[in-house]
Image (tube, rainbow, N blue to C red):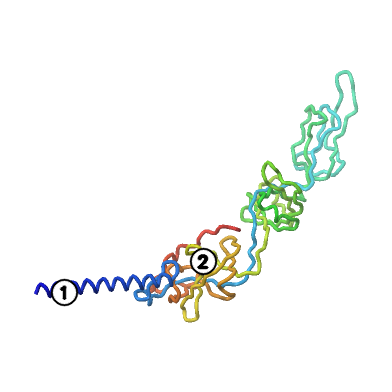
C-alpha cells in the first residue's frame, strides 16, 4: 500500500514538472513572438485588446527653434542739441507725432554777462516721441539726449539664435511671434536680416524679423516669444512617436490587418518633431498603426479599434491604454 502511494506521488510530481516545463517553453516562445510584454496563445490567445490607431501618411515635419526677442522700431533716433544751455521751450510731449525738421525744443546757450540767440532742436527723422523730452529749465550739454523718436508704424523683432542652429539661418525663414500682452494671438513674421557674425559672449547670432502685417496691438519695447521655423523634413511617412515600441535597440510598429489582427513590423525612424516621427522603413502609406494600447500586443493578437469610440464592457483594454500621450522630445 505504501509503495503504491509512493509511486502515485512520484507520477504526480513528474506530471507537474512536465507541465511546468511545457508552460515555460511555450511562454518563452510567445514572448519572442510578441512585442512589449508578449502574451501566450494557450492562456490569452482568445483575448481581444482595445486599441487606438493612426493612418500612416507622408507629411512634412516643420522643425523649429524657440527663442526670445524684443519688438523695436525699424527706424529710431536719439535727439541731441547742437549746443549746451538751458531748455527754455519744449514743443512736444510723449507720444507726439513729428516730421523730420520739426522743432522739438529750444535751448538758451546764454551765460552770465553774455547773450546768444536761442538754438532750435529739430527732429532728425519723422515718427513719434518715444521718450519723455527734457523739461523746461533743465541744463543740457551737446551730448545730452533731449528725447528719442521712432517710427512706431514700422516695427521689427530682433532675436538671438543659439550657435547650434545658425547653419539653418537665412533671410525668408518664417516665424510665429507671441507677445506677453496677447498670449493667445500669433503674429506672423519673416526673417529679413541675419547677422554676419556670432556673438562670442553669448554664443548666439542675431536675426531681424519683419511682421507680415501691421497691427496696432504690437508696440515697440514689447517682449516677444519667437518660434522660428528652420528646416522642413519631407518625403517620409509620419506617425505619432508613441506608436513606436522599443525593445533593446530594435523598434517596432504594430499594423492592423483586415481580419482585426495585428502584425509586428520592425522599423527604422528618422527625424521627430513635437511627438511626430518619420518612419523610413517597415511600413507603407495607408497602413493603420496602433498608437495606443500596444504594450501587451504580440504578432497576430486580436484587436478592436476604438479610435472613434469606447471599448465594450466585456473587453479588457491593453496595458497603458488611457494614460494619454507620451511626452514628445521636440525637434531632433
Q: Nearer the viewer, residue 278 or 155?
A: 278
> What mark, if any, has residue 231 been given in the picture?
none
Q: Is residue 317 visible?
A: no
Closest to the camera, between mark 1 and mark 2, is 1
Q: Regarding mark 1 in the picture, which secondary structure is present there?
A: helix
60 to the left or right of 212 = left
Image quadrant in which you'd find residue 173: bottom right
User: Does 282 appear above or below 228?
Assistant: below
Element at label 2:
strand
Q: Residue furthest bottom?
A: 259
Q: Quadrant of the C terminus?
A: bottom right
Given residues 178 and 134, the one toward you in this image is 178
Residue designated by label 2: 251
Q: Position of residue 212 (x, y in %)?
A: 74, 57
Give how far across and how far down residue 238 sits, in percent: 59, 68
Left or right of 113? Residue 294 is left
Q: Does residue 234 appear anywhere in the picture?
A: yes
For disc 2, the neighbor class at 10 Å (few under 14, some 14 to 19, many from 20) is some
Residue 269 lies in what quarter of the image?
Answer: bottom right
Residue 7 tag number: 1
The percent coordinates of residue 106 (x first, y second) are: 84, 32
Question: Considering the image in quadrants, where does the N terminus appear?
Answer: bottom left
Q: Earlier in the sequence, mark 1 or mark 2?
A: 1
CA distance separating discs 1 and 2: 52 Å
Seen from the viewer's position, the closer of residues 205 and 114 is 205
Structural crowding at the residue carrying mark 1, measured as other residues with C-alpha within 10 Å and reported as few (<14), some (14–19) or many (≥20):
few
Taking the spot 39% from the left edge, 72% from the top edge, the residue there is 29
**Could you say which is closer to the camera, residue 136 or residue 41?**
41
Where does the image place residue 65, in percent across and percent down from the top left?
64, 54
Answer whether labels 1 and 2 touch (C-beta < 8 Å). no
Please state if 182 lies on the left or on the right of 251 as rendered: right
Amino acid at each position: 500500500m505504501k509503495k503504491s502511494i509512493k509511486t502515485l506521488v512520484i507520477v504526480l510530481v513528474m506530471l507537474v514538472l512536465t507541465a511546468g516545463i511545457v508552460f515555460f517553453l511555450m511562454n518563452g516562445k510567445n514572448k519572442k513572438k510578441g512585442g512589449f510584454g508578449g502574451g501566450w496563445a494557450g492562456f490569452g490567445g482568445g483575448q481581444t485588446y482595445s486599441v487606438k490607431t493612426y493612418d500612416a501618411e507622408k507629411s512634412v515635419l516643420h522643425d523649429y527653434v524657440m527663442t526670445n526677442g524684443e519688438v523695436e522700431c525699424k527706424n529710431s533716433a536719439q535727439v541731441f542739441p547742437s549746443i549746451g544751455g538751458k531748455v527754455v521751450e519744449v514743443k512736444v510731449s510723449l507720444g507726439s507725432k513729428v516730421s523730420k525738421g520739426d522743432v522739438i525744443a529750444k535751448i538758451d546757450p546764454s551765460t552770465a554777462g553774455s547773450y546768444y540767440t536761442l538754438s532750435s532742436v529739430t527732429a532728425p527723422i519723422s515718427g513719434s516721441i518715444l521718450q519723455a523730452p527734457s523739461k523746461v529749465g533743465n541744463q543740457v550739454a551737446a551730448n545730452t539726449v533731449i528725447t528719442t523718436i521712432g517710427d512706431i508704424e514700422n516695427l521689427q523683432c530682433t532675436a538671438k539664435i543659439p550657435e547650434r542652429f545658425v547653419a539653418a539661418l537665412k533671410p525668408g525663414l518664417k516665424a510665429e511671434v507671441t507677445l506677453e500682452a496677447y498670449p493667445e494671438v500669433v503674429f506672423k513674421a519673416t526673417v529679413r536680416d541675419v547677422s554676419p557674425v556670432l556673438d562670442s559672449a553669448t554664443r548666439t547670432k542675431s536675426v531681424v524679423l519683419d511682421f507680415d502685417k501691421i497691427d496696432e496691438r504690437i508696440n515697440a519695447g514689447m517682449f516677444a516669444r519667437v518660434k522660428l521655423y528652420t528646416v522642413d523634413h519631407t518625403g517620409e511617412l509620419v506617425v505619432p512617436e508613441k506608436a513606436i515600441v522599443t525593445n533593446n535597440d530594435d523598434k517596432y510598429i504594430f499594423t492592423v490587418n483586415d481580419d482585426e489582427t495585428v502584425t509586428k513590423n520592425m522599423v527604422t525612424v528618422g527625424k521627430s518633431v513635437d511627438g511626430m516621427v518619420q518612419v523610413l522603413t517597415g511600413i507603407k502609406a495607408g497602413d493603420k498603426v496602433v498608437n495606443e494600447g500596444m504594450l501587451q500586443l504580440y504578432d497576430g493578437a486580436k484587436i478592436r479599434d476604438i479610435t472613434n469610440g469606447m471599448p465594450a464592457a466585456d473587453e479588457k483594454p491593453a496595458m497603458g491604454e488611457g494614460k494619454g500621450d507620451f511626452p514628445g522630445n521636440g525637434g531632433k
